[in-house]
Amino acid sequence: MAKSQTPVTPTWAALHVPDDHTLARLRGAGTGSTRFVACGDGRDAVVISPLQRGLAALDALGLPVEDGHSVLADHSRQELIVVVEDGWAHLWEGVPGVRVLSLGSWLLTPAPGTEGSFAAHWLSCPARDVPALWRDQERDPNLGLMSARVQPRALYDALASVDRPVIAPAAVS
């Protein structure tokens, strides 16, 4: 049987567990593969757990994986981190399994030029080149220059749709 020539569009859910080769690289990454970055300066980081729940929300949004959405995975904690515009922290108050890292918080991210580590891995790298983002701010890199293409309200709504219980239709007698 011939293989299809139609390219397969990756889903966010497919990124839940990295392939064996990627997993080995992430687990073996050295201390220089990540760095802490200050949150705030126009950007927050929405942390969703478990990771699979956050990936399902991104799939519900219909966002293409490869379009540079500033999305990270912390595989060790099973969390998804999405960089968004600041000013929306109130939206997430009281939402179980979600916290917002704002001004005064720090986020572990892949270091420029690396894939990151098991604790900080780009699932969708920012639209702008990461080394260029932090080149001028080498002493105190921050999220302020990173693209925040995921809309907080849309992410909130998508997560709510994922969290809604599915009720099976009643059996017809």
Image: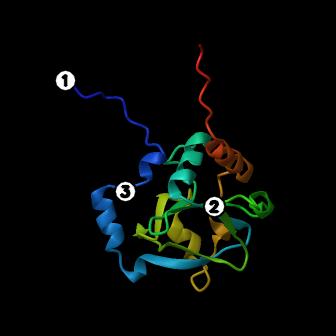
Q: Residue at x 68, y 69 (%)?
A: 144
Which residue matches tag 1?
1
* Quadrant showing the N terminus: top left
Q: Residue at x 44, y 53 (%)?
A: 16
- For label 2, the crowd category at 10 Å Cα-Cα, with few meaning under 14, some 14 to 19 and many 20 or more, is few
Q: Residue furthest left?
A: 1
Amino acid residing under circle 1: Met
Q: Nearer the viewer, residue 116 or 126?
A: 116
Q: Is residue 125 left or right of residue 33?
A: right
Q: Give residue 126's position: percent from left, percent from top.
A: 55, 59
Q: Residue at x 75, y 61 (%)?
A: 94
Q: CA distance from mark 3 to mark 1?
A: 28 Å
Q: Which residue is mark 3?
A: 18
Label 3 vs 2, first from the N-terminus:
3
As helix, strand or loop, the secondary structure at mark 2 comes to loop
Q: Which residue is mark 2?
A: 97
